[in-house]
Amino acid sequence: MRIRLPAFSSVQIALAGLIVILIGLVWINHDRVQRANERVRAAETQAELNAAAVQQLDHFTTTTTVIREKAQEAERVVQSAPGAGAPLDPDNRSVVCAELERVRGSAVCTD
């Protein structure tokens, strides 16, 4: 018993080949679009991280500047106070040194 295949014309074969090629092109294009979308999502995520890092850096810089300005003002006030040029009483100096050492966790007065 012989199986008989239907006869196709050259136009039908050409159309079938064209359809196969079109499906392949659509598949390739779909893959490219998917990869492009992944790159866009990665770039958006990186942009959000960069914005957050800039915001944190700005906050740190502002905070550091404020602390520095307050320290300079405190130093100015202490140095301009009456009797600022006089040395500390030895009893008061030992108390101040001990407290500073306790706060810092290391020796402050080394003389």
Image (tube, grey):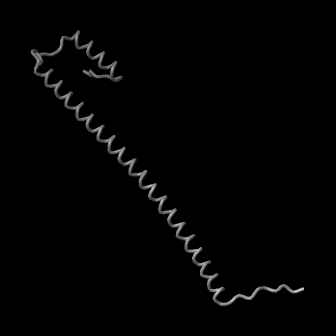
Which of 75 and 7 lies nearest the eye of the viewer? 7
- Side (left or right) of 51 relative to 71: right
Residue shown at the point (38%, 51%) measured from the top left: 47
- Relative image position of residue 66 (x, y in whole percent): 23, 32
Q: Quadrant of residue 70?
A: top left
Residue 77 drawn above or below residue 91? below
Residue 96 drawn above or below residue 76? above
Residue shown at the point (12%, 16%) measured from the top left: 86
Q: Quadrant of residue 16?
A: bottom right
- Relative image position of residue 5 (x, y in whole percent): 78, 85
Numbered marks: total:
0
Residue 90 drawn above or below residue 50? above
- Side (left or right) of 5 relative to 100: right
Which of 72 and 39 lies nearest the eye of the viewer? 39
- Relative image position of residue 101 (x, y in whole percent): 32, 20
Q: Quadrant of residue 22?
A: bottom right
Name of the residue lying farthest toward the bottom:
10
Residue 11 drawn above or below residue 89? below
Residue shown at the point (30%, 37%) measured from the top left: 60
Which of 67 and 56 lies nearest the eye of the viewer? 56
Name of the residue lying farthest toward the right:
1
Residue shown at the point (27%, 17%) measured from the top left: 97
Q: Quadrant of the C terminus?
A: top left
- Side (left or right) of 5 relative to 56: right
Which of 70 and 92 lies nearest the eye of the viewer? 70
Q: Quadrant of the N terminus?
A: bottom right
